[in-house]
Amino acid sequence: MSAHEIPIYQVDAFTSERFRGNPAAVCPLTSWLPDELLQNIAAENNLSETAYFVPNGEGFELRWFTPACEVELCGHATLASAYVLFEELGFAGDVLRFRTRYRGEVSVTRRGKLLTLDFPANPALPVARNPELDAALGA
């Protein structure tokens, strides 16, 4: 890959049919590019998310950008990244581990043709009741 060539895959996640599901762009990189360039590529792709990953030891680092900003977590673009690694780039294992900037480790497990996402859980926290919301919901 030269300095001007960045592979871009467009993957329809959550489907086995073309032109269905949730599309995401995926760009495998050998090292991180400047954030401004990652953002510009995502804006040019004009999909809800563009995922970028780079190798890191036995796993990968993974980041997601919308056309407007970087996001903390994106399920369908993670699934699309795993698909590219398994099906297009020949990753031989059955478990992919992605280190993310904001959410720690996420993983994708392959079982036959099925891919399973494993994301960190956020514990439920108590919140104060909102009278306006109660009224809107008829509570």
Image: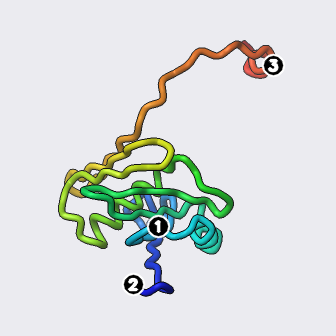
Few, some or many residues within 10 Å of mark 3 (<14, 14–19, 20+): few
Quarter of the image with the C terminus is top right
Q: Which residue is rendered at x = 24% and y = 53% of the image?
A: 110
Marks 1 and 2, how far apart at CA: 14 Å
Whether residue 46 appears in this view of the structure is no
Q: Which residue is the site of mark 2?
A: 1
Which one is in front, 135 or 76? 76
Above or below: residue 137 compared with residue 104:
above
Q: Amino acid at mark 2?
A: Met
Above or below: residue 131 compared with residue 119:
above
Q: Secondary structure at mark 3?
A: helix
Q: Amino acid at mark 1?
A: Trp
| 111 to the left or right of 133 | left
Q: Secondary structure at mark 2?
A: loop
Tag shown at residue 32? 1
Image position, residue 104 (x, y; %): 42, 42
Marks 3 and 1, how far apart at CA: 46 Å
Quarter of the image with the N terminus is bottom left
Q: Which residue is rendered at x = 68% and y = 60% of the image?
A: 68
Q: Which residue is the site of mark 3?
A: 132
Q: Which residue is rendered at x = 41% and y = 63% of the image?
A: 53
Number of dots carrying numbers: 3
Q: Earlier in the sequence, mark 3 or mark 2?
A: 2
* Mark 3 or mark 1, whichever is nearer to me: 1
